Amino acid sequence: MATKVASAGGPLSNPSSSSTVTPSNSTNLPLKLSQLQNLIKRDPPAYKEDYDTQFRRLTSLIDILLLSPNADPSPKLVELIQFIAAVSSSSFKGKESDEVARVLMGLLVGPGNVTGIGDAGNHISASALPLVNDSLPLPALQLHRDIRKACVSALILMRNKGAIPPLILLQLFFQLMSVVPDKNLRESLYHHIVNDIRNINKASKAGKHSPKHGNNGGKRDEKLNRTILSFFHRIVSASANESVHNNNYNNDTSSNNSTSAASFTGEDSPTDFAAKRATQITCDLYRHQVWTDERSIHILATAATHPSPSVMSRALRFFLNIEETMAFDKKSSEEDQWHGVQKVDLHLHSKKTKSRQRMVEKQLKNRQRKQNEREGKTIAEREDKGVEASRKLFPAIELLNDAQGTCELLLKRIKSSGSKYKFETKMLMLNFVTRVVGNHELLLLPLYPLLQRYMGGHQRDVTAILAYAVQSCHEYVPPQEIYGVLKTIAHNFITERCSEEQMAVGINAARAICARVPSVLAGDDEEDAGGKGENGGSTVAISASWDVEAFVRDLAGYAKHRDRSVSIA
């Protein structure tokens, strides 16, 4: 027969009274919540009444708390929240757990902002998910941080046990991250969202059936992934539209630019912060190879054209650095595996047995196999795979759907005279635009006159500008556009007034541009650079040696007949 004792907080009784009784004949012994939780786990139906008592106690304490939300909370309330969440999600999953989730969510964001709890939450669509609101009810904003942290921890616990659908909790956590100015809470919510989405797809890759994470017998739940991606895209798009509307309103109502500048120099709005977090989550999941399809790239492409500098910069850095980051992660993982394989237990000071001998031989064979694989990869990396393989170095950029429209919009922002973007942000946009133009072989003719404006000898980060000019060139660019770029480089870097280092940089940049656009060699550019080897030092002479020899060898169809005949002679 089950043993039942008084619930936590019950009246004290005589310690000498019996503690082993039936549920119908209980005694009033003092009981801690941890003890009651253990008893409910063993026999939930027998202790349903005690659970209901504790839940009514929780609702009463919450009603008292809402009278003064910012007051120091009672430690009993924090403990009771954890108890109710743990018991309801494990022993009373269903109607009871939904009611607990509704109460905790209502405490965080207000009762009127809680929707979708129950069976309908498992089949909710992205369009049905409400977007992030700019504000919360006053009691929710004034809630003590310990209570807010306890509620969030309880909801995460219930989500890990499968008592709450992922989409409802995702929308709630985005609401909290955007509005509540608590750095520690924001980091906790962010890490939970990333880990939850990774767990949903990790169990699917492993072929395990895990209903609480939303996968179905080893198959990726593409419907759930599409819903989450659509929700992220709606957040980024809504934030971008709101920023454009606010900027237009400020420009129309203000006689000067001080009001519009506040949107760039001030703190992010709640919608902008939500868009930045959605972008960061998508970047991290792409880095961990969870979301690597076109839908995730479309979200990041939308973020790359966002008016907010913080959102746009995060997306642009993703497209420019994600391949290097993933390669570094892969190399680090391989190095860890290599160091682990190298450790072989030879049992030098143990008794020699056949089983240990077989174990040593197996470890030695495994180490030799890993060493052969490591050497093979090193040899393959040293081989020249040609130009076509080098163009496939940026798979994220290759998945861009509207590369031409994205580049035109960013170029318009760079050229705008009233732009409030910093110089570093403009260089980031210019780097992205030139890389996309060179990778997709786009025709963006206004780009090359803009590059010439930044090619001054004393320009800040001029070497980066030259590198951007090189990566924006391809064989379909008209020679007239490239001819102006080469003239600017020759005038600012390849002259007698320039130092040896400046001349070497200019000649190397001109050589790289001509190698990418061979049709430009039909002009007279090679004569100016070719004669500078006699005026400079050894560095200039080495850099200038490309003009006749390289052109004749690789681009004989475009070099002049006089230079070709002299070289052959």
Image: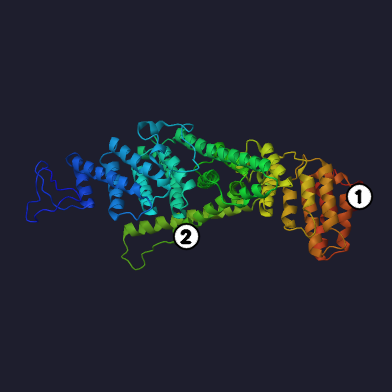
- 118 lies above or below 15: above
Label 1 secondary element: helix
Residue type for callout 2? His
Who is closer to the viewer here, 429 or 346?
Answer: 429
Using residue 502 as the reference point, say whether residue 2 is left or right of it. left
Who is closer to the viewer here, 74 or 194?
Answer: 74
Q: Residue at x 69, y 50 (%)?
A: 426
Where is residue 215? Give x, y as percent: 40, 37
Using residue 11 as the reference point, say whether residue 421 is left or right of it. right
- 239 lies above or below 142: above
Visible residue check, residue 328: yes
The numbered disc on residue 339 is: 2
Where is residue 201? Give x, y as percent: 44, 41
Name the residue beneath numbered marker 1.
565
Where is residue 237? Give x, y as percent: 57, 38
Among numbered discs 1 and 2, the one appearing first in the sequence:
2
User: Quadrant of the image for the N terminus?
Assistant: top left
Q: Residue lying at the far bottom in this picture: please name it.
A: 349
Label 2 secondary element: helix
